[in-house]
Amino acid sequence: MEVVAIPPFERFYLAHREEVFGYLRRLLGQRAEDAWQETFLRALRAYDRLEHGRHLRAWVFTIATNVAMDELRGKQAESLDDESEPAVELKRDAFRDLEHLTGDLPPTERAAVVLRYGYDLPYDAIATALGSNEQAARAAASSGVRRLRRTHERHA
Amino acid sequence: MNVTRSFSNITPNLDAGFRAAALAEGLIDVRYDLLDSPVGELLVAATDRGLCRISYFPERAEDEIARTIGRRLLRSPLDEVKRELDEYFSGARHDFELSLDLRVAEFHEDVLRELARVPYGTTTTYGALAARAGHPKAARAVGTVMNRNPIPIVLPCHRVVGANGSLTGYAGGLDVKEKLLALEGAR
């Protein structure tokens, strides 16, 4: 099997910090900054135990998803926009729509939809990120899409 | 998907906050920085124990450090190292006071310790350095130690020349060796 070297952490961090931040913004809104830092700290804590450099992107999305789920499940009662900082303007139109649309989905469905359609992650990677299996990941994404469609039709 | 990114979401504060938190938690094997110098861009790297690398080839050095010392490498200012190197390049500093983290085999360490005693502005030969390190017949092996010197400039392998006075070789290039010796007034 091809051995993929694990890059120095700095290189890994520079390669993924932007899209991980974008992902967390879509899941958590204004609460993304703390979750982003926690994601890379968790990655760093585990970094010297990695055995190979394959799937590092899926790996860091998995960590980000775990951090976001902790946050969403722990603070469901709080409003998404409870902080006073102005929103960072999102320049990626597709994501802006996605963020707006997915805001009302349950956390697991929201993560599945954003990872699949926002970041183009394959279902096996999404399953890992969600701590479930591929079938459940597909189900969460399609259930999320159905829910979005119903919501959209109601508002149309 | 074709996405062009015209700006960064990672503000300098956010980035600095993460780096500070990583250091504060003791999660970093090696801190490193890139410095401009009269002999080109230098990568300088340090562990908790001290300066462990100066390299003329930053990208290659990152990979090498990750392989040999630890992959948890993070860029972070090394103010003390920068200050002493700046002073050296301006001619104001002749001796370095930085603590070093050598991590080399015993023979290399013997030779590098002797090398550190070669005074500013002078040169010695591979053979003479070998003799001083207690290995009088090891001139060639001393050449190898110089070639693999992990902390050039601070450990002044540029002060070691051939028996006939020729520069012979230098990992950073002979022009750099020449420049350092000229800076020190040794040539």
Image: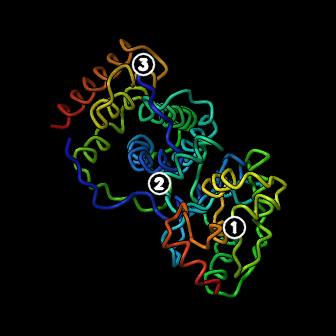
Q: Residues within 10 Å of mark 2 (few under 14, many from 20)?
A: few
In the depicted structure, whether residue B153 falls above or below residue B121: above
Number of marks drawn: 3
Q: Are marks 2 and 1 on the same chain?
A: yes
Name the kind of residue labelled 1 in the image: Thr
Residue shown at 62% from the left, 30% from the top: A49
Chain letter of disc 3 in the image? A
Residue underneath mark 3: A1
Q: Position of residue A129 (x, y in %)?
A: 45, 26
For the residues bearing labels 2 and 3, Cβ distance under 8 angstroms: no
Give the mark nearer the N terminus: 2 vs 1.
2
Q: Position of residue A66 (x, y in %)?
A: 52, 31
Residue where numbered disc 1 is placed? B125
**Could you confirm whether marks 2 and 3 are on the same chain?**
no
| Marker disc for residue A94 | none
Q: Residues within 10 Å of mark 3 (few under 14, many from 20)?
A: few
**Percent position of residue A144, x then y:** 31, 25
Q: Chain of mark 1?
A: B
What residue is shown at x 70% (from left), y 56% (from top)? B139
Quarter of the rendering occupied by the C terminus of chain A: top left
Tell me how far mark 1 sits from mark 3, CA to CA: 48 Å
Residue B129 horizontal side relative to residue A44, left or right: right
Task: Tell me the chain of label 2.
Answer: B
Residue A74: image quadrant is top right
Under circle 3, the secondary element is loop
* Helix, strand or loop for disc 2: helix
State the residue position of label 2.
B59
| Discs 1 and 3 carry the same chain letter | no
- Residue mark closest to the camera, 1 vs 3: 1
Q: Residues within 10 Å of mark 1 (few under 14, many from 20)?
A: many
The reply to whether dot 2 and dot 1 touch (C-beta < 8 Å) is no
